[in-house]
Amino acid sequence: MTGKEPLVVVGDALLDRDLTGHADRLAPDAPVPVVADCAERVRPGGAALAAYLAARDGRDVTLITALDDGPGGRELRRLLEPFLTVVPLPMSGEVPQKTRVLAQGRPVVRLDHGAGRAREATDEARAALAAASAVLVSDYGRGAADTLRAELRGRPPEVWDPHPRGGPPVAGTRLVTPARAEAHGFAAALPADRNQNGADAPRSDLRTVAHEACALVRHWRVAAVTVTLGARGALLSYGEHPLLVPVPAAHHGDPCGAGDRFAATAAGQLADGVLVGEAVEGAVTAATAFVGAGGAAGLLGPPRAAGTAPSADDPVGLVAEVRATGGTVVAAGGCFDLLHAGHVGLLQAARRIGDCLVVCVNSDASVRRRKGEGRPVNPLADRVRVLRALACVDAVAVFDEDTPERLLAELRPDVWVKGGDYAGAELPEAALLDEWGGQAVLLPYLDGRSSTALMARAAEGAR
């Protein structure tokens, strides 16, 4: 037993496929990239992804969705049935499939196939919904939620994840989770007296987001709306005085599936009895870690135990995920006692070199041995927290020795970065990097910036 409440997911299942290769030339007959040596991988998509993620969290999950008996439907059953219970609805047409072609890990084109829709509800689906202790609706606009709308009105869901082609959530839903563009589209379609800003309101203004979320809460007659804002986090509204929940760390990974991760986490936590605000905070954290771990593409390996997704607290796991997808791992190191513009400029430049940046920071004892008594000015916990707050930093690792060589041997970064005030002969790490084919590099450093100089100016000002 996991102690987690079961969850019923109602929605539209998709079959997602990634064709991942490399492109280094254009086709001779058209100015388009030639993607070669493609590896094909398939995974659940749409409501099936949300249900799969909830099941990977260690939860008992039932998915009510439309499936056909063709290759797509059979493949989805193969992917899902080891982890959760599938209650099929009859379908008109074929299971929708999305195929992404990626080169060097970046999407080049997406191909959609299949326009299947749920045809009708079944007694088995109604019974599963009637017995549910918690419900998530993942409405991709292909009919599953509509076939059970009468039953959902009598048993409002914990979370309704809407999409532009779907219908409105039922009244009484505890939390609705549109993305920013979706919320703007829904609000623009409201009657004028419900939409305080009108259809042409700017989409990047937090004030506009707050007003649109407020209008949706009132129009839909739901308890709360949270608008997901990508790297900015999520804005939660109960109708007034919104709460902005920022991301715990900035990641630049593949965001595909992040909305499903958000909705599945929020629904699960609400099922377990937490408050809406706490569920949104947990969902932001989970979605951030999900993107940092490679997004939906990161699900292709064996399931990871609940709560162990790589994050800023798990630099080794993060490095493994980035390396598994062919990314470049960059590391930089130092005391970072008093963070100044020189540090920030160096770390920002280092992050641009690769696909993740791990900062190796000296422990308090290591700083004292290097800098003398009275240092560090800021204890390790404060230095780590400040570094993690930088958008360019993906993870922080601590070493207690005088040099980071032991830590580097564990992380094995592709690139090791130091500031330009070091001479090449003073980089003992360079020989270590050679052992696994890594490269130590110097980056330009802002003149006149140092923690020691900063302390001296502060002391002089105090006198």
Image (tube, rainbow, N blue to C red):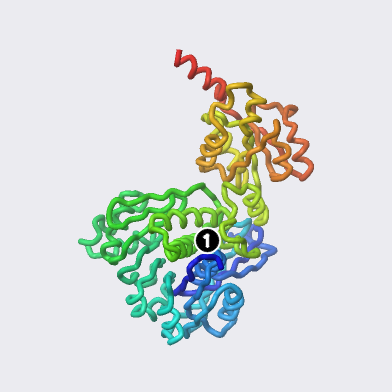
Task: Give the quadrant of residue 165.
Answer: bottom left
Where does the image place residue 102, in percent across and percent down from the top left? 60, 61
Q: Amino acid at mark 1?
A: Cys
Question: Is residue 290 rendered to the left or right of residue 326?
Answer: left
Q: Quadrant of the C terminus?
A: top left
Where does the image place residue 356, in percent across and percent down from the top left? 60, 47
Question: Is residue 74 rendered to the left or right of residue 458?
Answer: right
16 relative to 430, above or below: below
Where does the image place residue 444, in percent across and percent down from the top left? 61, 30
Q: Quadrant of the N terminus?
A: bottom right
Question: Is residue 314 rendered to the left or right of residue 462?
Answer: right
Counting the numbered discs, the total is: 1
Q: From the viewer's side, name the closer residue of 402 and 261.
A: 402
Q: Residue at x 66, y 30 (%)?
A: 366
Q: Residue at x 34, y 67 (%)?
A: 173
Secondary element at tag 1: loop
Q: Which residue is mark 1?
A: 256
Residue at the extreme top of the image, as rendered: 463
Residue 308 visible in image: yes
Q: Residue at x 61, y 31 (%)?
A: 364
Q: From the viewer's side, name the closer residue of 19 and 392.
A: 392
